[in-house]
Amino acid sequence: MAIAKDILGSVFSNGSAVLLARVVDSQGLPVTQASVASVEYSIFALEVDDPLTLTAVVGHEAVTLDIADVIFDTLQNDAAWTLDEVGYNFRHEVDVTTNEAFPQVGRVYQIRYEMLPLSGQKIVFRFQVRCI
């Protein structure tokens, strides 16, 4: 079983973010395009006094992503990936052309992904970023 933890980082106010992850299935194998039925993301602003209270960011709630745009069939290991030598198979650049994703400096945002495999349970992974 994979260890569940938020991936921490920072983003610039009114900017985009490129988010990378190595996503594995319940067997511990990296997911592939052919093994995934759907992927969606939402961005939430966390409340300072109550981090369990989430406020959806307009235009970034339950957005469906094109699987071929965000999942690689082989692990990538390039200059963008600095975590380890194994690599990543998920890359998403948050689109801010219509709606800002990270509008408030000092705020913490959660980017939550739900991936539905063709078989098995949904895969949830999250990023938590501070806006600077």
Image (tube, rainbow, N blue to C red):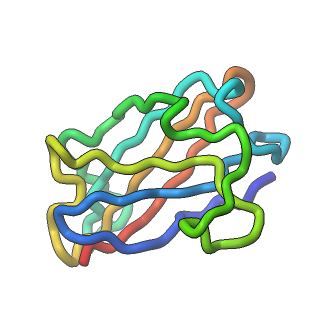
- At 16% from the left and 45% from the top, the residue drawn is 99
- At 33% from the left and 73% from the top, the residue drawn is 130
- At 68% from the left and 61% from the top, the residue drawn is 77
Number of on-image labels? 0
64 is higher (above) or lower (below) than 4: above
Residue 131, percent across and down?
Answer: 27, 72
85 is higher (above) or lower (below) than 60: below
User: Would residue 45 appear left or right of 128 to someone viewing this image?
Assistant: left
Residue 26, percent across and down?
Answer: 78, 40
**Residue closest to the far front:** 78
Residue 85, percent across and down?
Answer: 76, 69
Residue 128 placement: quadrant = bottom left
Residue 82 placement: quadrant = bottom right
User: Would residue 25 appear left or right of 129 to someone viewing this image?
Assistant: right
Considering depth in this image, is 67 or 122 the residue closer to the camera? 67
The quadrant of the picture occupied by the C terminus is: bottom left
Residue 25, percent across and down?
Answer: 75, 40
51 is higher (above) or lower (below) than 61: below
